[in-house]
């Protein structure tokens, strides 16, 4: 066993000496923090999008202008700014013709008089009405945009004019402006409560909401660490086989000691990365100020005070050991990285599958899908990390934990056999049908 720990120490020190280890440990939190600050800065400093309003009916423009004025008073700058139509645009033409004539400005081929680009146009036809007249529906308002994929302008127009249509309808029924203002100001206060074990009730706090969202973040952290470290395991074993380092290791340690040493060493690497990330997050939240820093402090407090850290360590350790041993097995039967690709495809499906249903599990942690996925060993760490803090029954936590422990030991045992039989193997990588024979041969060799 001492040899296994020596191999683990060697694996850990090799990783620590590599540039990729430090880049991963430093750049990932910096990129995460930078992307958050950048998106916040871009949101607060986004340039105003310029639009033209051509209202042939004279009914819609006042409501649109008023809505933008209210947004300006509330935020300091409205999302959309109104500019006059470019010179030469015939405001009395058919709406389609007006839109077509604005195309050079919308495409960016031509600029406005002050050099800025036109983002969109709202064209209200002459026969527009807030209330349908006759047998057909009212004429449609046309929204032209430089970016059809962005539905922001369309949503603004639809919401504003729909509210104006309802206001006019209620006024037509005899309601005065003061009554309408009071109606719009009406709001029902709703306080969320949750049933507790034993039949009690408790108000839902921010900590309760974080206890549902934080495990999802920890699940993704587990996934990221397995991908980072698993890839290093895979390439390391392939390189050691190619450079004959594996033969040197075999001269002083058994295959089981080599495999367990590599798992322990690479596990230490994964935990070290996560530890540094968490310490960096804690340090940043307590040094910084503002709403974002306060939110980060609440997350950290919830992580340590709710017992979530124990669930995380348990599921991280077992999930990491199971998935990492699979990467080791793939590396043992592959001569090159190209050979490993055919085995990595099903392995990546196993890794990604639980995350495809994670949102549904978080939404309904007691549902049939969540319960079934909890008992599938490869998805247990991810799914139960979300379900356990959400109030899963004690027998589910205990039962799935026992199944996960047994499954992890079984997978490591299988990979140890494969590792023993295949690490000195030469020639073409085995096909999937040959793997069972290799595992059996590894048993005989042991």
Image: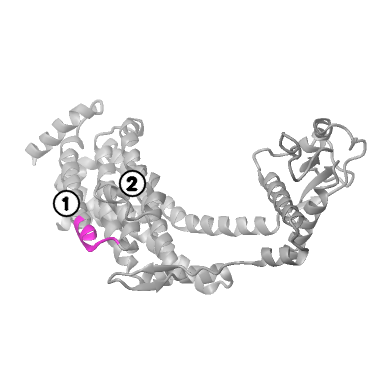
Q: Picture coordinates of residue 346 (x, y %)?
A: 31, 35
Viewed as shown, does residue 327 lie left or right of 152? left
SS of the residue under disc 1: helix
Q: Residue at x 79, y 59 (%)?
A: 69
Residue 77 vs residue 387: left or right? Answer: right
- The disc at residue 171 is none
For the point 70% across and 53% down, which residue is it? 166
Tag 2 near tag 1, CB within 8 Å: no
The boundaries of the magenta stretch are 392-399
Q: Earlier in the sequence, mark 2 or mark 1?
A: 2
Mark-to-mark CA distance, 2 and 1: 21 Å
Residue 398 falls inside the magenta stretch:
yes
Quarter holding the N terminus is bottom left
Location of residue 167 in the rendering, given as x and y in whole percent from the top left corner: 73, 55
The residue tagged 1 is 406
Residue at the (44%, 57%) spot, across then down = 25
In the figure, is residue 291 to the left or right of 259?
Answer: right
Nearer to the camera, 296 or 193: 193
Q: Is residue 134 above or below residue 3?
A: above
Q: Which residue is mark 2?
A: 230
Q: Can you give x and y, in whole percent of width and height, for residue 341 in the image?
A: 35, 33
Q: Is residue 378 left or right of residue 172?
A: left
């Amino acid at each position: 066993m001492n040899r296994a720990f020596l191999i683990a120490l060697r694996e850990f020190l090799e990783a620590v000496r590599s540039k990729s280890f430090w880049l991963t440990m430093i750049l990932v939190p910096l990129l995460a923090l930078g992307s958050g600050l950048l998106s916040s800065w871009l949101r607060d400093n986004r340039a105003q999008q310029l639009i033209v309003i051509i209202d042939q009916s004279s009914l819609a423009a006042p409501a649109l202008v008023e809505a933008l004025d209210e947004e300006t008073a509330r935020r300091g700058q409205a999302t959309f700014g109104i500019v006059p139509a470019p010179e030469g645009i015939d405001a009395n033409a058919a709406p389609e013709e007006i839109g077509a004539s604005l195309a050079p400005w919308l495409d960016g081929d031509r600029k406005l008089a002050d050099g800025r680009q036109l983002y969109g146009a709202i064209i209200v036809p002459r026969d527009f009405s807030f209330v349908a007249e006759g047998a057909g529906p009212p004429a449609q308002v046309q929204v032209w945009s430089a970016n059809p994929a962005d539905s922001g302008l369309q949503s603004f127009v639809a919401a504003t004019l729909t509210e104006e249509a309802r206001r006019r309808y209620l006024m037509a029924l005899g309601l005065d402006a003061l009554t309408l203002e009071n109606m719009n100001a009406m709001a029902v206060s709703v306080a969320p409560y949750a049933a507790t074990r034993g039949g009690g009730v408790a108000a839902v706090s921010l900590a309760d909401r974080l206890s549902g969202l934080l495990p999802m973040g920890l699940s993704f952290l587990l996934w990221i660490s397995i991908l980072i470290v698993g890839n290093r395991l895979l390439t390391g074993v392939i390189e050691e086989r190619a450079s004959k380092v594996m033969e040197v290791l075999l001269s002083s340690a058994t295959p089981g000691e080599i495999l367990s040493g590599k798992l322990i060493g690479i596990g230490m690497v994964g935990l070290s990365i996560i530890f540094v990330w968490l310490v960096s997050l804690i340090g940043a939240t307590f040094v910084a100020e503002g709403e974002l820093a306060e939110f980060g402090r609440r997350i950290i407090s919830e992580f340590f005070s709710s017992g979530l850290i124990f669930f995380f360590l348990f599921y991280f350790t077992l999930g990491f050991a199971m998935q990492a041993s699979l990467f080791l097995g793939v590396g043992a039967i592959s001569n090159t990285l190209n050979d490993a690709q055919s085995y990595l495809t099903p392995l990546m499906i196993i890794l990604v599958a639980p995350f495809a249903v994670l949102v549904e599990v978080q939404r309904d942690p007691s549902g049939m899908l969540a319960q079934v996925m909890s008992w599938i060993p490869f998805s247990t760490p991810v799914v139960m990390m979300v379900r356990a803090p959400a109030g899963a029954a004690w027998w589910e936590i205990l039962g799935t934990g026992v199944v996960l422990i047994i499954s992890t030991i079984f997978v490591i045992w299988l990979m140890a056999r494969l590792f023993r039989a295949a690490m000195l193997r030469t020639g073409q990588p085995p096909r999937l049908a040959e793997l069972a024979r290799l595992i059996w041969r590894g048993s005989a060799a042991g």
